[in-house]
Amino acid sequence: MKLKFCGLTREEDIAAANETLPDYIGFVFAESRRRVSDREAARLRARLVPQIQTVGVFVNDDPAHIAALTRDGIIQMIQLHGDEDAAYITRLRVLTDAPIGKAARVRTRADIERAEALPADFLLLDACAGRAYGGSGRQFDWSLIGKVGKPFFLAGGINEDNIGRALQTGAYALDLSSGIETDGVKDPVKMRRIAELVRRDNK
């Protein structure tokens, strides 16, 4: 199982990622307390070791902007968290060949099925938190997942207490943000512990 640390914003976060070596890190370009500008993301990306892939998180963004970030090498994968539909994803594919993922805010099994029907390469399953597009740190009912026909990242409230169960969901990757934070800041100790738990399970 792969591991993604999302919402990195500081050079210290990058240093911790370089030490713990998750498979992916995420830069949030949508409205959020973890949001980074294009320039900040480029600066942080330059300090990241090359074996860690970068994922851009977007909400209803201009496809040309997303494509430019992939073209410039700032991100290698795309994660769409807004109201992007099949036409949007198709338009984005014309502009970039980077893998595209679509987030599903899961309340029922039907939410997963609707996202699965879209022409995305992978899914991200997250909790539904009112009108928010993600990043709530809440866990949804993982028993709703069942069989999913595409690789999926599992997000929403994953931490040291429940990662054992998360590792049993069949996810392609676990995606953590608030679960590796202390007082709203990325915590290198928590990042290290989570990475160790995932690697131990992968043995």
Image: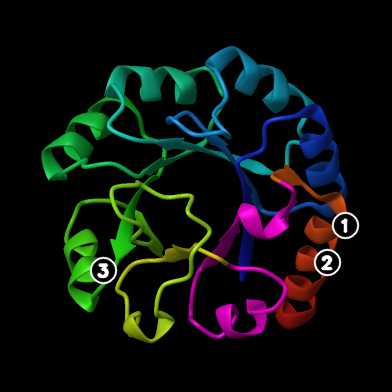
Name the residue: 49% across, 82% down: 169
- The spot of residue 188 in percent (x, y) is 85, 50
**In the foreground, 79 or 181:** 181
Q: Distance from label 1 to label 2 (Cα)?
A: 6 Å
Residue 92 part of the magenta segment: no
User: Which residue is identified by label 3?
Assistant: 112
First in residue order: circle 3 vs circle 2:
3
Front label number (3 vs 1): 1
Q: Mark 1: which amino acid?
A: Val
**Do the CB atoms of the residues marked 1 and 2 lie less than 8 Å apart?**
yes
User: Which residue is identified by label 1?
Assistant: 189
Question: The C terminus appears in which quarter of the rendering?
Answer: bottom right
Dot 2: what SS?
helix
Dot 1: what SS?
helix
| Residue 118 against residue 195 in the figure, above or below | above
Q: Which residues are magenta?
A: 158-183
User: Which residue is identified by label 2?
Assistant: 193
Q: Distance from label 3 to label 1 (Cα)?
A: 33 Å
- The spot of residue 60 in percent (x, y) is 27, 32
